[in-house]
Amino acid sequence: MGADIQWQNPPADAYMTWDGALAYCEDLTQGDWDDWRLPTIGELRSLISGCEATATGGNCKVTGECAEPGCRDEEFCTGCEWGQGPGPNGAYWPGEYSGDVYWYWSSTPVTDAEGEVWNVDFGYGGIHSDLVGYSFAPRCVRP
């Protein structure tokens, strides 16, 4: 699970637009670090735990290399049963992570879909695309 990156834990406790999330991560200083950024969809997927189809290597084909709308197959990318993940409150992330069981932004735009970005719903472990004006949470990463 993203051994070469460090995850913000806990994540931001506020929901914001995509532009707000990008700025939040760029401006974040936590611990002794100030080199945080919003994760790519591949990095965000690496945090999914307990939902085989959407975890890294699962049947959902959305990645940094496959970011067009056709990469999201409803059968494989929707996720699993709500609230049944291994994380606190049934989140589909590992048990050592905290945060609201909600939707989190990635930094990966949907190819050929102006104004849409990939995100993960950790309540279902699902991978979705939504408009940049929606309000989701950021969970920043650093190298």
Image: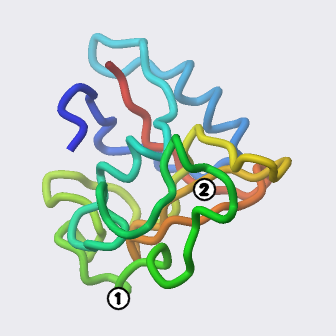
| For discs 1 and 2, the disc positioned in front in the rendered view | 1
Q: Position of residue 66 (x, y in %)?
A: 56, 49
| Residue 32 vertical position relative to residue 54 in the rendered view, above or below | above
Residue labelled with disc 1 = 81
**Residue ID at (28%, 18%):** 31
Q: Nearer the viewer, residue 143 or 99?
A: 143
Tell me the element at label 2: loop
Q: Is residue 53 above or below residue 114?
A: below
Decide: few, some or many residues near mark 1? Use Cα within 10 Å; few <14, some 14-19, many ≥20: some
Looking at the picture, the colour scheme in use is rainbow
Q: Position of residue 36 (x, y in %)?
A: 43, 22
Whichever of callouts 1 and 2 sits on the residue coming sooner in the sequence is: 1
| SS state under label 1 | loop
Q: Position of residue 95 (x, y in %)?
A: 14, 60
The residue under the point 48% across, 49% down is: 63
Amino acid, disc 2: Phe
Real-space Cα distance between discs 1 and 2? 20 Å
Quadrant for residue 141, please give it. top left
Q: Residues within 10 Å of mark 2 (few under 14, many from 20)?
A: many
Q: Amino acid at mark 1?
A: Glu
Q: Is residue 40 left or right of 132 when viewed as pictured? A: left
The residue shown at (49%, 38%) is: 40
Counting every numbered tag in the picture gives: 2
Residue 1 on image: x %, y %: 20, 44
- In the picture of the structure, the residue carrying the numbered disc 2 is 136
**Residue displayed at 41% across by 12% down:** 34
Q: Is residue 47 left or right of residue 122?
A: left
Q: Is residue 19 toward the left or the right of residue 63 in the image?
A: right
